[in-house]
């Protein structure tokens, strides 16, 4: 009986620990249409549309609970394939109010994809970490995947470079 009780408590503690872990996956939007330099809200170009689908495949092993994007065409187009693959509605965040108390509460214990920009994505990661670890992304780099793990004990991050070939 003691063994059963011990195993039960052990598995409950593991389940509780897993629920306290929040995983953030952050990417920059895919390649945008640059034909009109004055357009502040361009769509993705054909390569960008293919990369957005590629991100959904790369991230297909992650069961997302929430998918966030800034309210721009290029970020929404990048996030949509992953949101659809997880049967989720696309949610929006304000890059001027990222990672506030409300966001932390809504995302606690969940797997979250966040799509942003060359400046907002590393800034968002830095806000989660509470330190200025990452610089803005080069304007030609659409390959970074930032993974941030938040537990009761620590917050850690890694950045992966995920190349894409058409």
Image (spheres, rainbow, N blue to C red):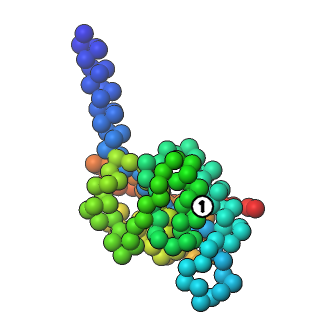
- Residue displayed at 65% across by 86% down: 36
Between residues 153 and 118, which one lies in front from this camera angle?
118
With respect to residue 57, does 36 lie above or below?
A: below
- Residue displayed at 59% across by 56% down: 81
Query: Is label 1 in a helix, a strand or a loop?
Result: strand
- Residue displayed at 52% across by 54% down: 83
Residue 4 percent across, percent down from the top left = 29, 14
109 with respect to 63 (left or right): left
- Asked whether residue 79 appears in the rendered view, the answer is yes
Q: Quadrant of the N terminus?
A: top left
Residue that lies at the very extreme toward the right in this rendered image: 166
| Location of residue 33 by image quarter | bottom right
Residue 166 percent across, percent down from the top left = 76, 62
Residue 72 percent across, percent down from the top left = 51, 73
With respect to residue 14, does 76 lie above or below?
A: below
Residue 80 percent across, percent down from the top left = 56, 59
| Location of residue 30 by image quarter | bottom right
> According to the image, label 1 marks what residue?
161
Between residues 45 and 127, which one lies in front from this camera angle?
45
């Amino acid at each position: 009986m003691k063994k059963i009780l011990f195993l039960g408590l052990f598995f409950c503690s593991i389940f509780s620990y897993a629920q306290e872990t929040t995983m953030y996956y952050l990417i920059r939007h895919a390649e945008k249409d640059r034909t009109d330099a004055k357009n502040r809200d361009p769509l993705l170009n054909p390569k960008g549309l293919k990369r957005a689908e590629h991100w959904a495949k790369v991230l297909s092993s992650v069961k997302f609970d929430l998918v966030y994007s800034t309210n721009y065409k290029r970020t929404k187009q990048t996030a949509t394939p992953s949101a659809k693959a997880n049967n989720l509605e696309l949610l929006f965040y304000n890059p001027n109010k990222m990672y506030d108390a409300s966001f932390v509460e809504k995302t606690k214990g969940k797997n979250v994809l966040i799509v942003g920009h060359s400046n907002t994505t590393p800034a968002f990661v830095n806000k989660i970490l509470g330190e200025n670890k990452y610089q803005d992304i080069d304007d030609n780099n659409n390959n970074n995947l930032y993974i941030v793990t938040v537990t009761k004990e620590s917050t850690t991050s890694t950045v992966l470079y995920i190349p894409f070939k058409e």
